[in-house]
């Protein structure tokens, strides 16, 4: 059953058409929480436009921990980026204009379908993993973010971990071309499956990187398609992927788009990439401040300095001082990296003994595998890497 939390006495009648029938109309947050406690069969909470935003987000944040399958839809008289960012961060599935009955009805349909899919996911989709979402981000282009994400992903896959790399730079994504892949589908194809996306649907758009065993979900080939991918599709994709993979890596554009905000909200770790130049450091400082404002956990992020030994008048110590945060990994500068990109190979597999590959492996082992509980002393998974190399 649906709960409508609305301060207006006639709220139930106002949204009767959009809700497709009866809803339990409650006028206060504590009553909503109590109703959810008393009856776990409630699948959806619609929050009216006059409910305080902070109160609405607090409820969504509490419930997404206790009941991740519960849908929360927020209605607003006016939509803006600030509201959208805060709502997505707290776990609200969609923010819809209060006067658009058709949009509300569609949001309700999508939410109910997603709830049904999440509830039955273990049986229907076979997903039993508690995978980790790792978002790689930089606030400036040209710092090697895609190189970092593709190499981390291929290495994790080569250790035996089931890994998928999602290219969320929907306009100009380079993941596929960086790995010399010709994807038959892309993120854009998932829009048609919105509301009922499952493991099989995700697999239908996956391209396999054979040298490592990595699965890749490419960006659309047409930049215009970026606007045709709603952020809730990304949320649905990452949730399904998390249940079917050990690691879900997300490569992003150098900007805080709706899709990137959605990825941050679901991420277990954010990898921030910079280089030794003032614009990159300045933009990363702004990005860190933005993440702090959004309430992102400082413990769930790590900073990577690419081309860290370049002689350009800045040192890693200067970057740490400017960012007021430690650097977790220094990746050296080498012409072998652009050469590997041009050849469409991952340097971490192609030249495993190079300083760059060693730095990237150390980053993956320390900041990802060990952080999330892998026993690196065991060596069972890492031996897969050696086997892959021996077959090349």
Image (spheres, rainbow, N blue to C red):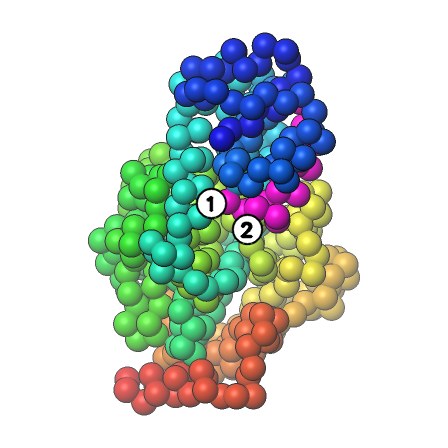
Q: Quadrant of residue 280?
A: bottom right
Q: Which residue is mark 2?
A: 266
Give me the residue at 61% from left, 71% from top: 371
Pick the residue in front: 314 or 233: 233
Residue 272 visible in the displayed image? yes
**Relative height, residue 268 to residue 120 (above, below):** below
Residue 38 on image: x %, y %: 62, 38
Q: Which residues are magenta?
A: 51-69
Q: Residue at x 47, y 15 (%)?
A: 16
Q: Is residue 352 above or below residue 192?
A: below
Looking at the rendered image, the quarter that the C terminus falls into is bottom left
Distance from Cα at disc 2 to Cα at disc 1: 8 Å
Disc on res. 172: none
For residue 217, side relative to residue 377 (left or right): left
Residue displayed at 32% across by 89% down: 390
Residue 59 location, x and y as percent? Answer: 66, 36
Closer to us: 81 or 356: 81
Q: Is residue 359 visible?
A: no
Q: Position of residue 219 (x, y in %)?
A: 35, 49
Residue at 56% across / 54% down in the picture?
Answer: 267
- 2 and 1 marks in contact (CB < 8 Å): yes
- Judge left or right: residue 206 versus residue 116: left
Q: Which residue is mark 1?
A: 235
Q: Dot 1: few (<14), some (14–19), or many (≥20) neighbours within 10 Å?
A: many
Query: What x and y, as percent, mark residue 305?
Result: 61, 66
Q: Nearer the viewer, residue 159 or 338?
A: 159
Residue 348 lies left or right of residue 300; in this view the side is: left
């Amino acid at each position: 059953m649906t709960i409508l939390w609305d301060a207006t006495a006639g709220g139930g009648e106002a949204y009767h058409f959009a809700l497709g029938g009866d809803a339990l109309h409650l006028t206060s947050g504590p009553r909503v929480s109590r109703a959810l406690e008393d009856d776990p069969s409630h699948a959806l909470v619609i929050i009216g436009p006059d409910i305080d935003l902070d109160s609405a987000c607090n409820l969504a944040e509490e419930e997404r921990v206790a009941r991740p399958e519960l849908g929360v839809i927020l209605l607003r008289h006016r939509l803006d980026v600030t509201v959208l960012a805060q709502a997505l961060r707290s776990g609200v599935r969609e923010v819809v204009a209060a006067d658009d009955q058709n949009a509300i009805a569609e949001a309700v349909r999508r939410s109910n379908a997603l709830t049904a899919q999440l509830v039955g996911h273990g049986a229907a989709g076979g997903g039993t993993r508690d995978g980790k979402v790792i978002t790689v981000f930089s606030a400036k282009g040209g710092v090697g973010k895609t190189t970092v994400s593709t190499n981390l992903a291929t290495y994790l896959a080569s250790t035996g971990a089931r890994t998928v790399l999602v290219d969320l730079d929907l306009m100009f994504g380079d993941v596929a071309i960086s790995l010399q892949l010709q994807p038959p589908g892309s993120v854009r194809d998932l829009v048609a499956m919105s509301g009922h996306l499952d493991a099989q649907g995700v697999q239908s758009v996956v391209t396999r990187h054979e040298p490592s065993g990595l699965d890749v979900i490419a960006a659309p080939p047409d930049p215009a398609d970026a606007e045709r991918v709603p952020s809730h599709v990304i949320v649905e994709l990452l949730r399904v992927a998390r249940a079917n993979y050990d690691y879900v890596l997300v490569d992003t554009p150098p900007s805080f788009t709706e899709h990137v905000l959605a990825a941050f909200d679901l991420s277990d770790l954010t990898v921030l990439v910079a280089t030794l130049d003032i614009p990159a450091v300045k933009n990363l400082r702004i990005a860190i401040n933005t993440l702090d404002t959004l309430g992102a956990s400082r413990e769930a992020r790590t900073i990577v300095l690419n081309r860290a030994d370049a002689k350009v008048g800045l040192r890693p110590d200067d970057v740490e001082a400017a960012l007021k945060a430690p650097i977790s990994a220094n990746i050296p500068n080498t012409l072998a990296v652009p050469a590997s990109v041009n050849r469409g190979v991952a340097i971490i597999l192609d030249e495993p003994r190079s300083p760059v590959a060693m730095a990237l492996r150390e980053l993956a082992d320390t900041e990802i595998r060990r952080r999330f509980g892998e026993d690196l002393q065991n060596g069972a998974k890492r031996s897969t890497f050696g086997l892959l190399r021996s077959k090349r």
